Amino acid sequence: MDFTFVHAADLHLDYPAKDLRSDLPHGFTETVREASTNALDSLVDLCIAENAEFLLLAGDVFDLRAPSLHAQLRLNAALHKLSDAGIRIFRVGGNHDPISGSWASLQDPSLAHLFGADAETHHVEVPGGTVQIRGLSHPDARFVQDPLQYFEPLPHVDGQFRIGLLHCDVDGSAGDGYAPTTARRLLSSGEDYWALGHVHSPHVVSEQYSHIVYPGTTQGRHFGEPGVHGCFVVRVRDGRAHPVFRPLDFLRWYQLGVALSPEILTEGDLLAHVRSAVRDAILDRGDRLAIIRLNIEGRSPLASEYDDLRARGDLLESLRLHLSEEDYLWLDSVSWNVLPDIAAEDRSMTPGLLVDVRRVRDALVSGDVKSTDLARLTQSLGELSERDPRVTRWSDPVSHEDLCELLVEAEAVLQRMVLGEARR
Ligand SMILES: [Mn+2]
């Protein structure tokens, strides 16, 4: 037995870009609007290029239970193109597109099948054997039963490869209680490959005995769905599945944190630093559009420069000019969480810290230390140690003896700081 199939889910055709804080420039609106349907076209091309026997679509093909005619026509065209290439399509509904939704009356090709609300079994002849595909579509957007109750566990049959097709939540991984089941039940059903949908990032739940796979969405829809999106091309040889992930997406979403250091002194430094950090962080997008939400953090003498809204608006515009033109990306928003360069504030902060150190040290000696005091001190000393290597940093809980020693050290350093012997 040697054949190939493709497994995709959660295409969410027609999903509107609604997570943006700014208006996209004209040239990008169409890229964003068409990304999910373009990913569908790429999926079809991939099935044909891989000479797949069939395509599995595991629910949420549409974003809405009453999808636009545009989305329905695009799906219909995709199904016909696959069918014309001799590729069968098996599809179930999901919570976004339950089979009780309203559809235009378009003629699906004969090779395309949408599973109904009762569990069904289909067979496909492939070189060297038979594939059995079981699946069902939930009629409604809400479905709280374990769908595995409709699937009788089956004994192994030589020469048969078994696939289950479902939109469901395995072990609470989607966290919304929709069609909840467990990996244990799926593994004991007799299926060789569970083609699932519902979780939006690619995730292989199991691959040891049989496969349980979520391909994720074919196109990330918002900042909550960062990273690569696509489908699995699954080659089956000698009864064993070998899924390989393939990207299909046309744009990627990034929430990036860029840290400033005290050496960044001018807006010129800042723009150059952010630009190079952003470029490095989005290398994986290839030639796709990148939509970015930026958080600038760290410590810099520039901290107070962008405190007010207007200055931040100006910064956003400067960054866009600096980044957008040549890089095919859109900077949606910038937040500014930069702290002052602590060195400049040595003298004002150390006396209070010194009092804290002494209080915790005394409490440690008497065995009566408060965890809140300790946590606050750990944080303050951690910040201080970033600037002054004489202050030892500790990250894990340490023994009382070590802690006492560290505090004695810290006290000595702080005392010298208070006396005006700060490093700079
Ligand atoms: Mn979905």
Image: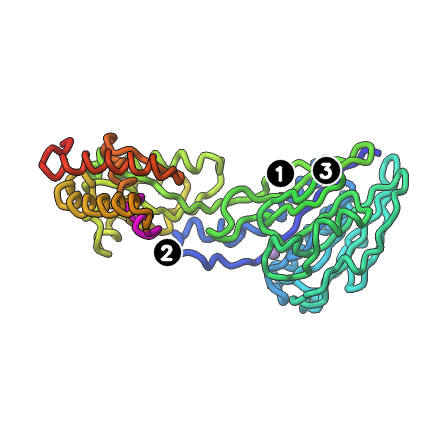
- Spatial distance from mark 1 to mark 2, Cα to Cα? 31 Å
Give the mark, 1 or 3, whose residue is nearer the N terminus. 3
Q: Which residue is mark 3?
A: 208
- Spatial distance from mark 3 to mark 2, Cα to Cα? 45 Å
Q: Are marks 3 and 2 in contact (CB under 8 Å)?
A: no
Q: Secondary structure at mark 2?
A: loop
Q: Which residues are magenta?
A: 370-378
Residue type at mark 1 is Arg
Which of the 4 image quadrants contains residue 382?
A: top left
Q: State whether label 3 is within 8 Å of ligand 1.
A: no
Q: Splitting the image into four quadrants, where does ligand 1 fall?
A: bottom right
Name the spot of residue 4 as percent of width and height, x first: 76, 37
Instruction: Classify residue 250 as left or right of residue 318.
Output: right
Residue lying at the far right in this picture: please name it: 158
Please say which color scheme the image uses: rainbow
Give the mark, 1 or 2, whose residue is nearer the N terminus. 2
Q: Main secondary structure of the magenta part?
A: helix
Which of the 4 image quadrants contains residue 276?
A: top left
Which of the 4 image quadrants contains residue 246?
A: top right
Which sits in the foreground, 388 or 245? 388
| Number of residues whose C-alpha sits closer than 10 Å to that of mark 2, classed few (under 14), some (14–19) or many (20 or more) | few
Residue lying at the far left in this picture: please name it: 420
Name the spot of residue 317 as percent of width and height, x first: 28, 48
Q: Which residue is mark 2?
A: 22
